[in-house]
Image (cartoon, grey):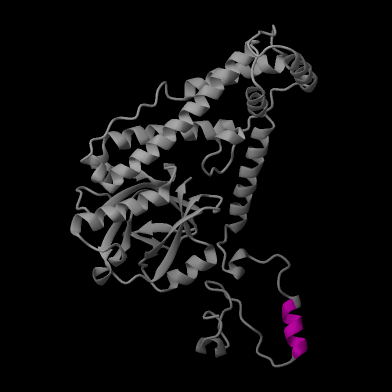
Amino acid sequence: MKQFFTAEAYDPEFSLVVGESLTMPETTKYSDFVQWVDMLPLIESPTWLGLPANAEVMLSIQESHKIIQDLQRLQEVIDSSANDDLAAEDEMNMDGDDDEAVGEAPAWLRTLSGFVASWLETLPSAFDVPETSPDAAANPITRYMIREVEFGRKLYQMVKGHLEDVAELCKGAKASALTRTIAMELSKGSVPDLWQKYPSTAFVMSSWLPDLNKRLQQLQTLVSNVDKVATDGVWLGGLFSPEAFVTATRQRTAQKFGWALEQLVLETKFGVSLDADDGMSYCIRDLTVENANVNGGMIVTSNDLLTNIPSTVFKWVQASDASKAVMSLPVYLNSTRKNLLITLAVQTSDDSMTKFAYQRGVALIASS
């Protein structure tokens, strides 16, 4: 509305598209306007809708991601007779004791065996939870890490335990109905429903398990160096409860300075690192901004589809000391944009950035 309903719109040379020359005809006749519309190209540039010129490339990328996910799901190891083999095995299992062996496993299970072995190698050999002292637990971030690590430990034990059970099933051992169900899901390359404890872009084993392994590795590093979390940085999208971490940083700052939580607001600097822990600032690693770029610690206009931000600083300050923010910037968990983590109030280099951000759908992604 602000773009078109301005005093400049009465200028005969006023362009309907920013950066291009698309002017209205100098006439008052309806037929002239219809003729002008008919003369417009059949295929318009995406810029006419306020989109970047490479918007079609973005659509192609999204379609490619979908095709890859579909192909991953098609990587089944069940051959044409698999269902018959499984049905026959199930019938045998119904008549036998659960502790008895049933002989050689069917072909689809023997094929699955190699995948299960590689998945077990991908997981850490152990996921230890270090003990914390009562004094350390007074730190809100430490308390958060304890909960986060406990969640990761339970998920790790469940995934590893189920994979070990399926490995035995692949060798021909008798197994429970739950283990056979998990084996069937794994044979399709899908993540079993019981393991889907946190949001993911795609629940396929080829991408989900390496992602889980990366999350577990980060947790072990963080919980062993809680005092350095602020400066070393956190992969926000790699936490199981990223919103709770942001809340814990706010609580820590309020506790350290004796400030009320409701008095604190979040300031953000993009593309900068943190050398020392001042009690207010926290380094966030590997955010990605879509449809924009970073310059001078701010989000700026750009036709880039994706820009990685290696380091971003979140700083909690009192509202009375906060810089005036001019734009709201959403932070989503991943590229599906289904899970909104927080909305940042950020500064921009110029007023036009706000309009640009809304037109282009600029957003931050915590886990790419």
Magenta stretch: give its range: 30-37
Residue 70 placement (x, y as % from top left): 67, 38
Camera sees residue 94 = yes
Where residue 30 appears, x then y in whole percent? Answer: 75, 89
* 206 lies left or right of 313: right
Q: Is residue 213 visible?
A: no
Q: Decide which of 277, 161 is in the foreground and name it.
A: 161
Which residue occupies 24% across, 45% down?
138
Position of the N terminus, as image quadrant, is bottom right
Magenta stretch, overall SS? helix
> Looking at the image, is 277 positioned above or below residue 254?
above
Is residue 168 shown above or below 294? above
Percent across and percent down for residue 354 are: 45, 70
In the rendered image, which quarter is residue 103 located in?
Answer: top right
Q: Nearer the viewer, residue 294 or 158?
A: 158
Q: Is residue 32 magenta?
A: yes
Q: Position of residue 107 (x, y in %)?
A: 71, 14
Farthest-out residue, bottom:
28
Give yes or no for residue 263 being in the magenta stretch.
Answer: no
Q: In which image quadrant can residue 144 be found?
A: top left
- Out of 216 and 270, give the one closest to the viewer: 216
Q: Is residue 250 left or right of residue 337?
A: left
Residue at horizontal 40%, vertical 74%? 351
Image-based side of 21 in relation to 271, left or right: right
Q: Is residue 103 above or below residue 11?
A: above
